[in-house]
Amino acid sequence: MIQITNLKKTYGKVNALSGIDLTVNKAELFAYLGPNGAGKTTTIRILTGLTRLSGGTATLGGHDIEKQTLAAKKQFGLVPQHINLDSELTVQENLMVHGRLHHMPRKAIKPRIDELLGYIELTEKRHTPAKKLSGGMKRRVMIARALLHAPQILFLDEPTVGLDAAIRRRLWALIKKIQQDGVTIFLTTHYIEEAEFLAQRVAFIDEGRIIALNTPQNFMDAIGHWAMDRFAGDDMQTDYFGTQEAAKAHAATHQNGFSIRRVNLEDAFLNLTGKKVQ
Ligand code: ATP
């Protein structure tokens, strides 16, 4: 559904992307993870036609974003990083304006809005101005807006940034439901547990390159199943073990200041890069 070949982007002397190769399958939930400045937003901006690429190719549903821009743009909906609803307009008006901008027939917009408001469980907020919604509700409306024209692909750029844990989980359930309904989802996130929970495959990107790509489970299995964290001087040291027993046996050789836990995707990323996703 998304095919990227040797994708490059330079901003003056900055190499934002240095040759990305990637294929995302139909109805896959693909997560794109990396630290600040890694090139995540640049990739999404190119794929959604907001920025021109400097080299390589990108196709969406078989349509080249540079050469068949209009056809490629029809393939996706985009939920950008920053809330960009019209705060004075109601939920329904925000959706209506978007439908008209996408040249949807008036008759088709209304039932689609009804359907999507039910889908995101915000029917009762239909006539509420966007400025009166909570952060989580605004995100849900942005997702509904991106789905209005029934795209095949949904780009989610940091969809849960700034939301508390409970609201984030509610959004995860919605994102999962959208994928199960057959939409291909390309997700960028700083919340590594979000990728671990949601994604079928994860690409770790750093300094404009994909440094590893695998399923969350394979990433974690590669380093062990249990981790022991302990303070060593000013730093924290983490050791990995195949079994909880092995981790406990190792812990017995240290007096205190340690904790034993399951390995998570952040361990895999730290192991690969020495950097935290932040
Ligand atoms: P974040 O998680 O902070 O959003 P990111 O992974 O999305 O980071 P990008 O925003 O894609 O990273 O940035 C990749 C690189 O390109 C960075 O070095 C950034 O400074 C640079 N960059 C991005 N946009 C521009 C621009 N318009 N002009 C110049 N440099 C840019």
Image (tube, rainbow, N blue to C red):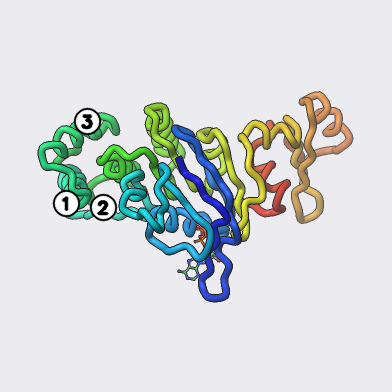
Residue underneath mark 2: 85
The percent coordinates of residue 147 (x first, y second) are 30, 40
Instruction: Give above or below for 86 relative to 52.
Output: above
Instruction: Give above or below for 244 relative to 1.
Output: above
Residue underneath mark 1: 89
What's the residue at 22%, 49% (across, down)?
102
Instruction: Give above or below for 272 relative to 54.
Output: above
- Callout 2 secondary element: loop
What's the residue at 68%, 31% (across, down)?
262
Q: CA distance from mark 2 to mark 3?
A: 19 Å
- Mark 3 surroundings: few (<14), some (14-19) or many (≥20) residues within 10 A: some
- In this view, the residue in front, 237 or 20, is 20
Q: CA distance from mark 1 to mark 3?
A: 20 Å
Mark 2 and mark 3 lie on one chain; the one further toward the N terminus is 2
- In this view, the residue in front, 78 or 228, is 78
Q: Is the C-beta separation of discs 2 and 1 under 8 Å?
A: yes
Residue underneath mark 3: 115
The percent coordinates of residue 50 (x first, y second) are 38, 60
On the rendered image, what quadrant is the N terminus found in? top left
Q: Is the residue at mark 3 in contact range of ligand 1, meaning its CB lies under 8 Å from it?
A: no
What amino acid type is highlighted by mark number 1?
Leu
- Callout 1 secondary element: loop
